[in-house]
Amino acid sequence: MKDQKNSSIGATFYQQKNFSGTPHEYKEREVVYELPSELNDTFLSVKIGKQSLVHGWRHFRDSQADQIYKVWTESTSDITEIQGLSKFVVAPKNTQLLSIKLTNSSENTALDYVFVQTYTIDNPVNILVNDDFQIVGLIPNDGRMYVTSVILFDKNKVPMEIGAAYFMYDAPTDSLNFITYPETFPAGWKLVKRKDYRFELIIENIKESSNGVAFVR
């Protein structure tokens, strides 16, 4: 990738302020960049292509104490406000970040993880139960509903229950929102929007069929 002074997409980080030092170039992608130990907490400035932005976090775990989350929409000569960059996403400006957490509030202790795949997002993710928020990908700012397939799995990797939710950009709030339908979203599930890009899938009841796979109705 070309240096960001000559490119309209992507980002280049520097280990000194004012874009000094060795450049480290990163392309746009939906998968989070987690910095290796030799680069963790070392980036102090960033050049960003005009069509891109950067989501950045101080810590690797989203819910870690003293976490700092920042969005840089233009080249910034001093990013020390984040107090040490550990991970980031380089994204197109016309997108919203989507992250999901799985919480098991049911009496079924067999639940192990949820498989999440969103239309147009190439990389499906497995999110462990009662763990942290995990980045699913990017939703375009076009107002369209993007269907997201959701499958619960037990500890033996057997499907337990299936469902679907729809995520879309909400222009009045300039943020991501969702909608579910009873025909495709199990009654024992609850999807809740938390702060910023975060959504929590709470499982209150799991209704398995006789063969181990539940239908939504």
Image (tube, rainbow, N blue to C red):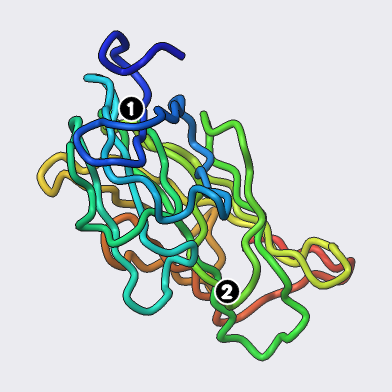
Q: Which element is circle 2 on?
A: loop
Which part of the image, by quadrant, shows the C terminus? Answer: bottom right
The residue at 44%/26% (across/down) is 25
In the image, residue 5 sits, relative to residue 207, either above or below, namely above
The residue at 73%/86% (across/down) is 109
Residue at the spot of label 2: 131
Q: Whole-percent x and y of residue 100?
A: 48, 60
Q: CA distance from mark 1 to mark 2?
A: 28 Å
How dense is the environment of label 1, judged by Cα within 10 Å: few (below 14), some, or many (20 and up)?
A: many
Q: Nearer the viewer, residue 197 or 45?
A: 45
Q: Whole-percent x and y of residue 195?
A: 27, 65
In the image, residue 185 sits, relative to residue 25, either above or below, namely below
- In the displayed structure image, the side of residue 147 where residue 216 appears, left or right: right
The residue at 43%/37% (across/down) is 146
The label number, if any, that marks residue 101 in the structure image = none
- In the displayed structure image, the side of residue 18 where residue 198 appears, left or right: right
How dense is the environment of label 2, judged by Cα within 10 Å: few (below 14), some, or many (20 and up)?
A: few
Residues tagged 1 and 2 counted as in contact (Cβ below 8 A) = no
Q: Residue furthest left?
A: 172
Quarter of the rendering containing residue 24: top left
Q: Nearer the viewer, residue 204 or 57?
A: 57
Q: Amino acid at mark 1?
A: Pro
Q: Amino acid at mark 2?
A: Asp
Quarter of the rendering containing residue 18: top left
**N-term-proximal mark, 1 vs 2:** 1
Q: Nearer the viewer, residue 63 or 154?
A: 63
Q: Which element is circle 1 on?
A: strand
Q: Whole-percent x and y of residue 5?
A: 26, 14
Let me know if residue 142 appears in the view: no
Residue at the spot of label 1: 92
Q: Nearer the viewer, residue 177 or 78?
A: 78
The residue at 32%/11% (across/down) is 7
